[in-house]
Amino acid sequence: MPQNLLDFDLPGLTAWFGELGEKPFRARQVYRWIHQEGVSDFAQMTDIAKSLREKLQQQAVVQAPAIKFLHGSADGTRKWLFDVGVGNGIETVFIPEDDRGTLCVSSQVGCALECSFCSTGRQGFNRNLSVAEIVGQLWVAQHALKAEANRTTGETAERPVSNVVMMGMGEPLANFDNVVTALGIMLDDHAYGLSRRRVTVSTSGLVPAMDRLAERCPVALAVSLHAPNDALRDRLVPINRKYPLAELMAACRRYLVHAPRDFITFEYVLLAGVNDQPAHARALAELARDVPCKFNLIPFNPFPDAGYEKPGGEAMRVFREILQGAGYVVTTRRTRGDDIDAACGQLAGQVADRSGRVIKRLHREAA
Ligand code: SAH
Ligand code: SF4
């Protein structure tokens, strides 16, 4: 099997080149060709000696997951569905805004954590994505968007993707090693050069892994709260039974010691009649008092047989105003790319369980 070079961060590639008898600066050159230029064909790496190019052709590939389809929306949103084998799909979404371009990246095929309002959670868990499959989503998007911009404007686009959020399918901290290696590649100046604050990991609250992330790679952290007390959170986010709110809040404070001047983004999916009442907002304001944070309110994004509904505009307004009145910065997630079903965090590809049986197929276009 040829070695997939998308699986390596720079230290890993350098070590592998060492085994081939090649110098570290050669690894750096190839790494830059791959990530900065988007080149997968070694023959095009013109400043690399022919003998090395031939060696690489025999022993290596640069292989991102295969694109099943790409959908564009009128507002500039793009969605890729990638084939990750045996009937499994993962999705990646690009959301352009005036001052940034955000890519929403998946970390696992399915998710084992079974949050009750999440279509990924309903589909069960199949497997972790490899480093190549995680970074490959950025590699494909960055270079496809660059080429697209070059075609339309005639100018060389710099970095269409300026921000990455690990909010696609899966729980990133449950695939810790691969996610941390992939994050390192995203931040590396020889690769994508994204700044630490422009890369966000979203977690449902795996406390020990939050501590490890703080030490290894303290990127921006988003924590999915969804409830202001343990009784309700136990139901909505079952991992809360293992790491209850008091422990989670303490972990958030510890995280910020490693990321000074940062804040935690608390995500809160509003479910009509379940967690969207004024009393919930007041309890939430109290819960988060000692954590530098802001809130991101997300209207529930419905899917078939979900058993939940999204709140009305009035409930959302009241909820937001209570938090704002308590002094918090609150954003409400805009729904973008609705026409291509691309709401981030609601990415439903199709997931087969370990035996290969397709558990559920929620994806409209894939059907
Ligand atoms: N597993 C991680 C990251 C992926 S989900 C996590 O849970 O944080 C990204 C965000 O989308 C999370 O806040 C998640 O709770 C939210 N989400 C999941 N299902 C949703 C739905 N049906 N509608 C709106 N947001 C949802
Ligand atoms: Fe997994 Fe996040 Fe969905 Fe929960 S909300 S099931 S942690 S992907």
Image (tube, grey):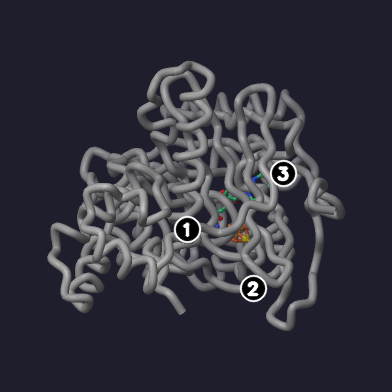
Residue at 70%, 72% in the rendered image: 86
Amino acid at circle 2: Asn
Observer-nearest of 41 and 194:
41
The answer to which of marks 1 and 2 sits earlier in the sequence is 2
Give the residue number, with chain letter if any, for mark 1. Answer: 134
Residue extending farthest to the front is 50
Number of residues whose C-alpha sits closer than 10 Å to that of mark 1, classed few (under 14), some (14–19) or many (20 or more): many
| Residue most extreme to the bottom | 355
Residue 81 - label: none
Q: State left or right for residue 46 relative to residue 283.
A: left
Nearer to us of marks 3 and 1 is 1
Identify the secondary structure beneath mark 1: helix
Badge 2 crowding class, 10 Å Cα cut-off, few under 14, some 14 to 19, many 20 or more, is: some
Q: Where is residue 208 in the image (x, y as percent from the top left)?
A: 37, 70
Quick one: label 3, few (<14), some, or many (20+) residues within 10 Å?
many
* Residue placed under numbered mark 2 in the picture: 126
Residue 230, image x and y in percent? Answer: 57, 60
Q: Name the residue under label 3.
A: 271
Up/down of 206 relative to 198, above or below = below
In which quadrant of the rendered view does residue 28 lie? Answer: bottom left
- Alpha-carbon distance for marks 1 and 2? 15 Å
**Quadrant of the image where one finds ligand 2:** bottom right
**Tag 1 near tag 2, CB within 8 Å:** no
